Amino acid sequence: MWVLIRRAYFFFRPYFFLRGKYYLYECIPEETIYVDLNPRIRNLDCYIVSSNPEADNLAAQGFDFRPRVVNARKNLDKGAVALCIFVDRKIAHMTWIALTQPARSSCDRLSYSVFFHGGEACMGGVFTLPEYRRRGLMKYGCYRTLQWLRDKGVTKVRFAVSIRNIFAQRAFDHFPTYIYGRARFLQFLWLRFYKETINAQP
């Protein structure tokens, strides 16, 4: 009984309480050196999904990520784009991409500036399932995301990485990213606090 309560607590906690410290990154997709970063995992497939009808078509082929991802249908309806990496047709890694403010609000809670009308974009909601971590999926997912953004004509992409997430920081070190600031975020129920410091050193 207590095990179920504990699991429920940690599952629902991000919906009513969240806090963290973040590095604020930006990257110029056009400056990225596009090399083969395929992690050499067998039965790996990567798809970029921009709508629920596209996700329906993938699901019909056995690649269905929405049951494992909270609010996936709503995010897609608001315009967010999902980069999905599957291993043996099971979702292993995801990155949400936003090209508009409505899409951004569906998958990123932080308030750093993104000038969508100026050709910028942002990434958020990045995760790798525990059994697939430290196998190069984060780095490969970033590579495919930046490649897609470059082809879309995006001039700059911004995103936040938890200061505690050393492995994600190491993955992004493979690309022409730089930290332009730090941010602190606190949410309790509907109350939110956000503060950033521009040009802070990591």
Image (cartoon, rainbow, N blue to C red):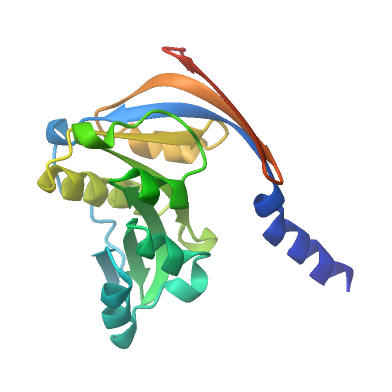
Q: Position of residue 45 (x, y in %)?
A: 27, 69
- Name the residue at 33% across, 50% down: 97
Q: In the visual, does 29 lie left or right of 172?
A: left
* Left or right placement of residue 101 versus residue 7 in this view: left
Residue at horizontal 44 percent and vertical 34 percent from the top: 160
Q: Residue furthest bottom?
A: 60
Q: Position of residue 38 (x, y in %)?
A: 23, 56
Q: Number of callouts in the render?
A: 0
Looking at the image, residue 84 lies above or below residue 116: below
Is residue 114 placed above or below 147 in the rendered structure? above
For the residue pair 92 and 84, the one nearer the viewer reads as: 84
Q: In the rendered view, tell whether residue 45 sits above or below residue 108.
A: below
Can residue 43 be seen in the rendering of this structure? no
Q: Determine whether, in the image, residue 135 is placed left or right of residue 166.
A: left
For the residue pair 122 and 37, the one nearer the viewer reads as: 122
- Given residues 138 and 16, the one toward you in this image is 16
The answer, for residue 48, to whether it is visible in the render is yes
Screen quadrant of the N terminus: bottom right
**Residue at position x 35%, y 69% in the image:** 86
**Residue 130 placed where, x, y %?**
54, 59
Residue plotted at (45% across, 52% down): 106
Q: Nearer the viewer, residue 147 or 129?
A: 147
Q: Is residue 136 left or right of residue 160?
A: left
In the rendered image, residue 112, in percent from the top left (x then y), is placed at 44, 29
Residue 156, above or below 80: above
